[in-house]
Image (tube, rainbow, N blue to C red):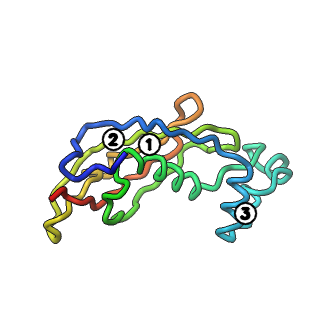
Amino acid sequence: MAGLYFEDFEPGHVFRHPLRRTVTEMDNVLFSSLTLNPQPLHIDRHFCETETEWGQPLMNSLFTLGLMIGISVNDTTVGTTIANLGMTEVRFPNPLFQGDTVHVTTEVVGKRESKSRREAGIVGPASPDHERGDIDRDDDVLSHWPIPSSVSVSL
């Protein structure tokens, strides 16, 4: 699907993204290794079983965030994003574990024309109270992330 343009986004619209992904131990170890993150909470099963409340490795939170954004792009802004303008107040209220299947919803909560670029508009949260969320395991919310994005205008 081609990405949506600024004028295609309507506040209140909820995307229930059809792409899903079951995360694996390899995802966790590879991502942690590529980012030079030796945190045993992600890569050492014995440590997690004996030293943590979770009893198993947690998926790296930046992997989780990247996966959620990646899943959402196909239905929203593939090819039309000019830039992500920032990520604030990213939260992970529940853990993601190896073997969990991730699915994502995105709500359009606001948009405005760009003040500096005639060919762009800004789509994103109108306030920090509005969020995009990733849902998994019995509808547990795994993360919230308000991300304003600059999106092309169809000229």
The amino acid pointed to by label 3 is: Gln
Q: Are marks 1 and 3 in contact (CB under 8 Å)?
A: no
Q: Pick the quarter of the image with the C terminus.
A: bottom left
Q: Quadrant of residue 82?
A: bottom left
Instruction: Report the side of 9 relative to 92 (left or right).
Output: left
* Amino acid at pointer 1: Gly
Q: Are marks 3 and 2 in contact (CB under 8 Å)?
A: no
Disc with the residue nearer the chain's start (1 vs 2): 2
Q: Looking at the image, is mark 1 or mark 3 earlier in the sequence?
A: 3
Give the answer, above or below, for where 103 lies relative to 64. Answer: above
Give the image location of residue 73, x and y in percent. Answer: 41, 51
Q: Residue at x 42, y 39 (%)?
A: 105
Q: How many marks?
A: 3
Element carrying mark 1:
strand
Residue 117 position in % (x across, y down) = 17, 69
Q: Is 124 on the left or on the right of 73, as rendered?
A: left
Say which residue appears at 43% left-offset and 47% top-offset: 72
Give the labeled residue for mark 3.
39
How many other residues sit within 10 Å of disc 1, few (<14), some (14-19) or many (≥20)? many
The relative height of residue 16 versus residue 152 in the rendered view (above or below) is: above
Report the disc number at residue 133. Answer: 1
User: Residue 109 location in percent, x, y?
Assistant: 27, 44
Report if the CB atoms under discs 1 and 2 are less than 8 Å apart: yes
Query: Local crowd at mark 3 within 10 Å, few (<14), some, or many (≥20)?
Result: few
- Residue at position x 41%, y 48% from top? 74
The amino acid pointed to by label 2 is: Glu
Q: Which residue is mark 2?
A: 107
155 w.r.t. 50: above or below: below
Mark 3–mark 2 distance (CA, rounded to whole Å): 33 Å
Asked which secondary structure carries label 3, the reply is loop
As helix, strand or loop, the secondary structure at mark 2 comes to strand
